[in-house]
Amino acid sequence: MRFGVLGPLAVWTTEGREVRVPEVKVRMLLAALLVAAGRPVAADRLADDLWGDRQPGNPTNTLQTKISQLRRVLEKAEPGGRDLVAYHAPGYVMRVDVDVARFRDLVARAKEDPGGRVALLAEALGLWRGPVLAEFADFPFVVPFVQRLTEERLVAWEEWASARLDLGEHGELVGELGELVAEYPLRERLRGLQMRALYLAGRQSEALASFAELRSRLADELGLEPGPETASIQQAILTQSLPGTVPRTTTPQTNLPAPLTELVGRDAAIRSVRKLVAETRLVTLTGPGGVGKTRLAIEVARQVGNAWLVEFTGHDHIGDDGVREATAAALGVRDDDLLDALRDREILLVLDNCERVVSSVARLASTLLKAAPGLRVLATSQEPLGLAGEVLWNVPALEVPEQSTSDVLAYSAARLFVARASDAGFVYTPDKAAAVAAICRRLDGIPLALELAATRVRALGVDQLLNRLSDRFRLLDNGSRDAPARQRTLRAMIDWSWDLLTPPAQVVLRRLAVHRDGCELDAAETLCAAADVRPEDVLGLLAGLVDRSLVSSGPRYRLLESVAAYCVERLADAGELAEMRRRHAGYYVELAERADPLLRTSSQRGWLERLDAESGNLRRALETLHDDSVLALRLVNALVWYWFLRGRLGEARRSLRQALAIPGDGPRAYATAWLAGLGVLAGEAADMAGFAAADDIEDPAQRARALWFLGYVTATMGDPGSTRLTDQALALFEAQGDQWGIAAALDDRVTQWTGMGDFVAAERDAVVSAKLFEELGERWGQLQSSFTLGMLAQARGDHAEAERLHRNGLRMAEELGLWTEVSYQLSWLGRVAMSMADYPRAWELHSRAMRLGAEQGFKPAEMYAETGLAMGARREGRLDVAEKHLLHVLEWHRQGGFEAGSSLILAELGFVAELRGDAAEARRWQTEGLKIAKESGGPRAVALALEGLAGVAALEGSTVDAAGLLDEAARIRESVGRPLPQAQRGDVDRITATIEAHRR
């Protein structure tokens, strides 16, 4: 038997039947023994607990009578129950299964199992049915127990809330935390959690107001200030850096079926629907077949109480009279007496599976609600009843695990699948997590599909089951024999919904299946329309499919994966599959070509987001075009700039290769040139044949963009040859009046001018480029301008302005989701921090930038950040760390064939050797760097190498040579109008000090 203290005192048999314990003193005796938690309680102590100061004439005998009564109740409930109350001198003891032990065990397990923390704590808190031993909560023997358990529950709730916040459930937690904070206003951790949830939900002012209220109440009531943890949350908000079982209801009578299995993952749904049922008289649960509308409605009805179920399954086309008769029969009354039977009753009527008789059900519900003021209706249907006052609640699929999560059982879909598979002997272990998560995603979190799949685990195991889901309708054909026919197989589940549709609706639904990850309205209208469906009719048909929960909307129209697979079969049956895939591919080629030029305008952000949403369709289009080189090349050429902006270089290169591998005609030179440039950015050696392909591009606009991109790539690598490519592109852009192209080329010229030491020209082109990008409203270009203007500010020693520009650039890059640019912006901020000798911050910024560059597969950004790490490490004296990073960057430069850009790296390696006292090694590095600097024509690079050689001479004691070299370096810097800023004079000042020390 089981006993419950986490709520009203409760007793259940082994089978789960509740046991009524009559008479207050007998219940109090049971409570006293359970509170002792398996420890013997002396007879005199029990007497004090039961009667206090009002002891009966013979307390011992009276107590024995109560013990006997309790034993009789337990024995009657279950044979052997009397033995649970045992005599143990000098009193009595009960060593039984109490819910509080289970609660504590789950909480303890949650501490040891981070992956299952949310699920375990949810299960623990789900054991609570209300206040602890509510009937006896004020009795002295219960008070400490209640206080202790209430505290344990609050701590567990706080842990659960914290874990859920980590999973991003702040939206749901805001309301729950508000109720608890109102009950425990001085509890600081609870308040801190509420502040975090409000902040994460975008309600910062309310979060700060909560803190202010706490501080005021603490001061007024206790004379205290908030603790440091709570205060730190407030500070983080200010700085924007803040990185159950419900008590059973007694119903006079009901026809609700008893559940055979636990309802998994629907606690929040039950609470929401119960609230709606309490607030309004007509609630309709909608949702796709198999999502669990019926099960949810029955569970809500069971908890609300006084509820009756009317099932319309199998009552197709029965009309108004048939619906009325079915309802009366369910209530056990004659149909003529239905209104009278309901008129004066407080009752909840559950009208289940209304979709096939929706009009008749709607008319009956309207009549009954008007005639019976105490009546409430909870309906389930794949489409609304369409009555005034109806509140719709769409039953969602269960939560499916994300691909990257390790905490699989924190998601309700996985918990349901594992629970049902466990019934057949499946044992879940962490190594099965990825397969379980993938199954849940493939089946869209639909409970019926998950339950059908779980029955196959015993025969196949989860890995084989996952592999066979491509043939899901054949696989999932083994439902429970006692289930309705529509729920015995996956195909039958969808057939049920399909058969309700008109022929035009069936056409639209099956044609939607050609999409991947949904589509916009314009795509649906274009692709779903044909001779049998007019374009202007598509929207209305879509709305009907949304109402029937076969299509989800907002703003994209999507099909569940199983519905899509079903509809693909229907497309094939109709002989439309090949034709629809071709039409789909053609539509998305045109969409990509429409988007490409707009990605260089003020509409850039909107089109980036549109193409993000269409990624699945664009990939499917390329798959379809495996034998059409012209369309495939048009598609990838139109998308390559989008892929570059999003940092998806791997996808860009794979797609370009895939299209180029298709035999046939098409714009190959443009794709070849871009592929060559992307290869350099990915860290490969330059493909000179690919670079040369840019000259073969026939279309002048495409040739200009390809030449510009190759110039941009080589400028990023520090190659002086980039100037020729940029100049060619600039001339073409100017001839075409392409303002974006002119701005982009001029921005690249800024970097090239500074490399040559012409800061006047650099400042001129930077201003013109920034003005053009601002007029265009194109954010990527504005990001480039923020870099070049920031670089020029830093070169003239204005670090505050440089930081402002780079911070503004970082904000723009993050807003647009341009993560390669975010990497660069972080590195540029790291350079500013290094110039200000804030080396810890510089290290942090460069580390973040390097990780991000590596994640994006964007080698120049990764190497630029690693160069920053090396420079900072050397300035901090961590020479081994600096050398390791420098040699890695140097190797990359040499492998890529862009050794001309390595003069800085060679100078830094020379400084490392000099600081170690190795003059020969230092001279070797600095001499090599000077040679490359002279060949590239960069005056400041020459000056840096001369400063390095001055350090070597000073180390060797040649102070005259050292001083001369420093003077020559200073003269060169002065000649280009950029003397070394004070914050960057560390090496020069150090070498000067060595010279002066030798002279003394």
Image (cartoon, helix red, strand yellow):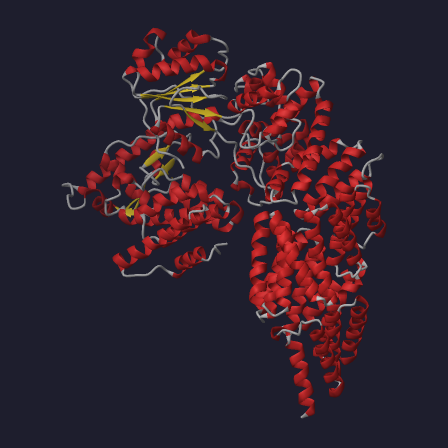
Q: Residue furthest bottom?
A: 1000
Picture quadrant of residue 429: top right
- Horizontal side of residue 32 vs 319, given as left or right: left
- Horizontal side of residue 659 vs 13, given as left or right: right
Quadrant in which the C terminus is drawn: bottom right
Does residue 36 appear in the picture of this structure?
no
In front of the other: 376 or 15: 376
Q: Is residue 43 above or below residue 308?
A: below
Q: How many marks?
A: 0
In front of the other: 341 or 153: 341
- Residue 592 drawn at (x, y percent): 69, 37
Residue drawn at x 15%, y 43% is 54
Picture quadrant of residue 51: top left
- Horizontal side of residue 860 vs 219, given as left or right: right
Q: Is residue 740 above or below residue 957?
A: above
Residue drawn at x 40%, y 13% is 363
Q: Is residue 324 above or below residue 744?
A: above
Residue drawn at x 66%, y 59% is 766
- Residue 936 drawn at (x, y percent): 79, 66
In front of the other: 622 or 637: 637
Picture quadrant of residue 236: bottom left
Does residue 259 appear in the picture of this structure?
yes
Quadrant in which the N terminus is drawn: top left
Residue drawn at x 34%, y 52% is 187
- Residue 579 drawn at (x, y percent): 73, 23
- Residue 960 drawn at (x, y percent): 75, 87
In front of the other: 89 or 953: 953
